[in-house]
Every structure is written in C-alpha cells, then in structure tokens.
Image: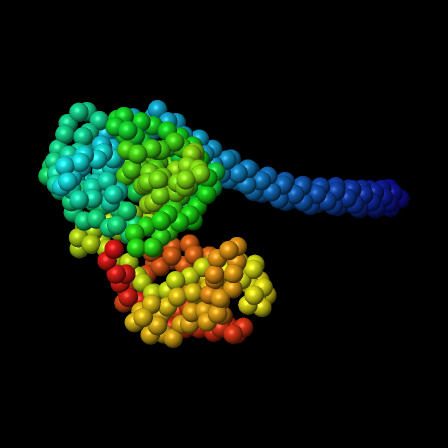
Amino acid sequence: MYTNKGLIVVIILLVFGFLFLGWYSYNLTQELATLSSQQLALTKDITNLRSELSAASSKLDTLSNKLDSVVTETSRLVINIPNLYNRVKEGIVQVTNYKTDGQKVSGSGFIFDNCGYLITNHHVIERAREIEVAFHNGIIQKATVVGSDAYSDIAVLRLSQYSGPMLTLGDSDKVNIGDNVIAIGNPFGLEGTVTSGIVSQKGRLLPGPGGFSIPDIIQLDAAVNPGNSGGPLLNSKGEVVGIISARIELLRTAERAAVGLGFAISSNLAKRVASALIEKGSYQHPYIGIGVTNVTSKIAEAMNLTRARGLLIIEVKTGSPAALAGLRAGDRSIEIDGKKIPIGGDIIIGIDELPVEDLDDLLSYLALHKSPGQIAVLTIIRDGKEMKVTLILDARPAP
C-alpha cells in the first residue's frame, strides 16, 4: 500500500514537473520571441540610424562643398591689394623707348619668364633705337627686342641678365564679367601706380593696323592712362589675365572721349603670340580674306532671314583663301542709317561647328585656335540655304 502511494506521489511530481517545464518553456519561448522582436526592432533602428547618418554625412559634404565654393568665389571677387602688390611689384617694370626719330616714349611691362623675357605693347617699343627697363628698386637695364607684333599689339623684350621674381600668365577664359581686377603700371611716368575695378565686359574688339581688329579684348573700369600700356591686369590670385592697351585715343571722336574705359589684350592671346615671338621672332595671323559686317535686324529683313545672326560677307579679296573657296560677297546695295551696305552675299554662321554670332566670335576663334596653313570649315547661309565651305587659311599680309 505504501509502495502504491509512493508511486502515485512520484507520478504526481512528474506531472507537475512536466507542467512546470512546459510552463517554463512557454515563458522562455515568449521571452525569446520578445527578445528576437526587440533585436529586430533594434536592428531596424540601427539601419535607420545608419541611413540618417549617411544622409546627414551627404548633407554635410554638400554644405562643405558649398562653403568651399563660397570661399573660392569670395577669394575670386575680393582682392587683398596691398598683399598682392607687394608680391608682384618687383616683376613689373617701366619701359622707356628712345626712338629713332629722337622722341622718348614710356610704357609698362612685366617679367613672365625666368630667362629674362618681358611682355609689353608693340606701340610702346615701335621704332626703337634703344630701350631701357627700370625696376621698382631703381635698377635700370638695357633690353633688346625679341619680336613684336603690330596686329595684336604685343612685344617681347629680353634682359641680358635677370634673376628676380616673375609674374604668371593666367587663363583669361576663366575671367568673368564683374570680377575684381587691378592694373599696375606707370601712367604719365608715375611709377608703380595701382588702380582697381571690375571686368566690365569681354569679347570686345580694338582697332588695329590695316583695318584689322584685335579680338578677345577685356574691358575694365579701372583707371588706365598713357604709360599703363603693356602693364599687367591681375586677378585675385595675382595672375596676369590681360595686358593693358591704353591706346584710348583710338576710341575717341570729336564729340566725346573714352572716359572710365580701359582695355586689355587677353592673356591667352598674349601667350600664343609671345611664344611664337620667342621661338621665331615673329607671329603669323590666320587670314581668310573677307570684309564682313554683323547681320542686323534691317539686313536680316532685307535678305528675308528668319533672324539676325552671323556675319554678312561684303567683300572677298582677290586671290585670298575666301576667293579660292568660292565665298561670295554682296551683289546689290541697300541704304541703312545713311550708309550703303552690300547685301546678298554669303552669311557666316559657324566655323568648325562652333556658332558665329558676331565678328568677335570669328576673330577670337581664329586668333586663339588657328594658324596659317590649317583648314577651317565655315557654315554659311547662301540664298536661304545652309551649307559648308572648306578653305585653307593663309597668313595675314604684313601691316
């Protein structure tokens, strides 16, 4: 009897044990499920945090880039003039030309090569018998003419010995309208004069010899006067982006004078010309052999054009690349604003697949990218139809 009771107790204990184990296992499973759910939620939170962190990092990078851009733009527009002047003054010189006719002409220039080469204007050293170069520290040296180009108004001189600082020719294509610039030179012989202003416009034309124009000109409002000619136009980095050409008398008329206007030959054109002058002693400009005028609204109307653009050919020089390529000038004339304009000729609207809206577009492209002997493909409108004309560029006749 006792044995049976003991067995029953054992069985009861076993049942309760299994029930307890079942209950414990259930609770444990629930806790594990809760932990797993919490782990999934935590993983999701971590993933979300990582995404938010990544987004925040991206925004931070964007803000950093914008800040860098603002800093760059600020440094581009704002010039520390005293600092910049002190950095470059030793490389800027006064050029004095004792001419063959006994006259004395003064201008400016700057050293741009450690071999003692310096740039100035052609009109500063024209018909030179002897040239003196005066530095900021009072030292005067004789200079010889390496080469000079009247069409671009650029000349290169060389000093017999030089070991001082030099200026860097920058990229004038990166100059923007509104950029702050400074001009340094010797107006009226006043040594080391600094003036500042902004770039007023780009792509101007200056009159040159033989009826040709100097293209890619930078217009500025910094005060420049005779004696500034040949001096540097500097950006905020102290790079030369233009060579001052102070021949303002070329723009004067009987009724008015060019007041508050300055002009500089682009550094990219100066680089191209100066390099050839050093290497060969001369520079050859590409030549098409045409006379043109910008297509105005009145010309467009007279020729039944859809809009005013491009260059109307009004003259083709005999024996020129244009004549050999079959380009046509106007065959009849109309009067516009009291002037006779030949119309009916070919209209140039492109060169080498680049659009030509006005004369500076054509001349700048030729001056900066083409040389005599190279091929140029003009896009023209003839009798209302667009077509291509290929020609071989010649060298421009001597002035």
Q: Residue furthest left?
A: 160
The reply, left or right, for residue 68 in relation to residue 128 is: right
> Which of the 4 quarters of the picture holds residue 194?
top left
Here the colouring is rainbow
Residue 276 % position (x, y)? 22, 53
Residue drawn at point x = 34 percent, y = 55 percent: 211
The reply, left or right, for residue 5 in relation to residue 353 is: right
The number of numbered discs placed on residues in the rendered structure image is 0
Residue drawn at point x = 47 percent, y = 62 percent: 341
Q: Nearer the viewer, residue 21 or 252?
A: 252
Residue 387 % position (x, y)? 47, 74
Residue drawn at point x = 35 percent, y = 36 percent: 234
> In which quadrant will I find the C terminus?
bottom left
In the rendered view, would you say 248 is above or below 392? above
Residue 369 % position (x, y)? 34, 58
Q: Is residue 155 visible?
A: yes
Q: Residue furthest front?
A: 338
Q: Nearer the viewer, residue 164 or 365?
A: 365
Residue 151 % position (x, y)? 28, 52
Q: Nearer the viewer, residue 29 or 164?
A: 164
Q: Nearer the viewer, residue 45 or 136?
A: 136
> In which quadrant will I find the N terminus?
top right
Q: Residue furthest right?
A: 1
Q: Is residue 14 visible?
A: no
The reply, left or right, for residue 391 in relation to residue 336 is: left
In the rendered view, would you say 325 is above or below 176? below
Residue drawn at point x = 38 percent, y = 57 percent: 363
